[in-house]
Amino acid sequence: MKIKEMDSKNYVLLILLVIFAITLALSANETDKKANIQTQEEIEKIKATNNIDEQAKLYRQLIERVGPEQAQEELLRSGLPFTGQTHLLNHVSGDYLYEKYGTAGLVRCKDYFLSSCYHGFILHAIGTGGLGELDSVMNECETKGPTVSAQCAHAVGHGFLTWIGYANLTGALELCDEMKERSADFPLYNCQDGVFMENIWGIHSGKPSPDRWVNPNDTFYPCNDPRIEYKYINACWSNQPTLMYQSFRGDVKRVGEECLKVKDTMHQRTCFNGLARQIHPITKGDTDITFQMCGQMPQDWIDYCLVTITSADFSVGGRDMSFQICARIDKEGKDQCYQTLFAVMKAYSPTNDEYEKFCAMVLEDEW
C-alpha cells in the first residue's frame, strides 16, 4: 500500500512507530554509554585501593553487573599490574563461577593473570568436594575438547600445590597421579606442568612463597633434586627456563647455553621449548622481535624456537604472527613450521569451514 493511499490514522500510526523505534535506539545507545561509564568508575575504585578485601568486594559487584566473562576482560584492560595481588583479586571470578554454575562454570574462565580465575575455581572446588569434585570438573572440561581439557588439568596442577602447600611439591605431583588413576583420560603432563609453574610463581600469599623449591645459586634446581622422581622431571624442565631467565636478567643467550648443558636429550629439548615459550609473551606479537630473540639461541635451536612460538601464539588466539613466522623462516625450518601450524589450526577448528578460513590466512600460495 502506498503512503498516499493510507488513511490518516494508519499514517499517524506509522509515524509513531518510526519515532518509537528511533527513541528505543537512542535510549539503548544512552544506556550503553552509562554502563560503560559505570564500569570505568568501578575499575577506578578498584585501582584506588590497595586493600585486597575492598578490591574483591568491588570486583564482585562488577562481576554481578556485567557478568564474569566481561568482568575478566575489563580487569585485563584496567591497567592493574600483573602482580600477586591482581592474581589473587581475579580468584574472585573463579569463586563466582563455581558458586553460580558449579563444575560447568570452569570453561567461562579466561587465562588472564597467570590463570587466576582457574585457580580460584579449582581451589573452591577442592575445598568443597575434594578430588571427587574435581572428577566432575574434568568431566565437564572433556566435553569441550582436548585443548580445554588440557588447560583444566594445568589449572588443577596449580591448584594442588596451592592447596597442599608450596613446601610439599612432591605431594602435589602425587595428587596429579591420583587424578590419572581416577580417569585414564586425565592429561597428566599438563597437571605436572601446572604444579611446577605454580612453584615458580608461588604468589597466592600476595608475594612469592618462601616455601618454593627455588635455589638462586643452582639453575638446575629443583629439576636435579633427588626427591623428584624421573617421571616428573620433564615437566620440571618445561618451566625451569623461566627461573633461568629471571636469574640471568633476560639474557636469552645465557639461558640457551644452560639448556645445552642438560644431558638428557628429551629434557634438553623441553628446556629449549620452555625458553621459546618464555620469549613468546615478551615479543608482544612482533615478528621482528621474535626473530631477533630466537636468533640469540644456539644455532641448532633457532628454527625450533620460531616453530614453538608459532604454535604458542596461535594457541592463545594470535592470528597474524604465526603465519608471518612460517612465511619468513628459512628453508630448513619451513616444512616443520607449516606442519606444526596446520596441526594446531586443526586442533582449534571445530568445523572444516573454520579450518579453511585459517588456511586462507596462509601467506605463501604454495602452502
Image (cartoon, grey):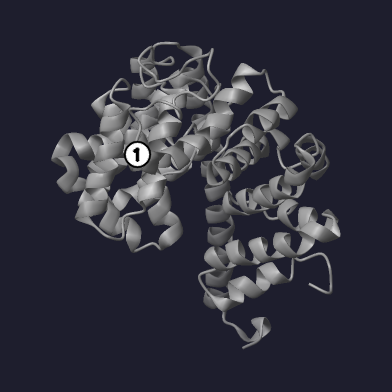
Going by the numbered disc 1, the residue's amino acid type is: Gly
- Label 1: state its secondary structure: helix
**Above or below: residue 285 compared with residue 14:** above
Q: Residue 149 location, x and y as percent?
A: 38, 55
Label 1: which residue?
157
Q: Is residue 275 left or right of residue 293?
A: left
Q: Nearer the viewer, residue 274 or 232?
A: 232
Q: Is residue 273 left or right of residue 302?
A: left
Q: Residue visible at 70% across and 45% down? A: 305
Q: Nearer the viewer, residue 74 or 81?
A: 81
Taking depth in this image into account, of 78 and 258 the one nearest to the observer is 258
- Image point (76%, 39%), residue name: 294
Quarter of the image where the N terminus is located: bottom right
Point out residue 75 in the picture as x, y percentages from the top left corner: 50, 31
In the picture as drawn, the residue positioned furthest to the front comes out as 263
Residue 157 position by quadrant: top left
Residue 140 showing in the rendered view? yes
Q: Residue at the location (45% across, 27% down)?
A: 224
Q: Is residue 60 left or right of residue 75?
A: left
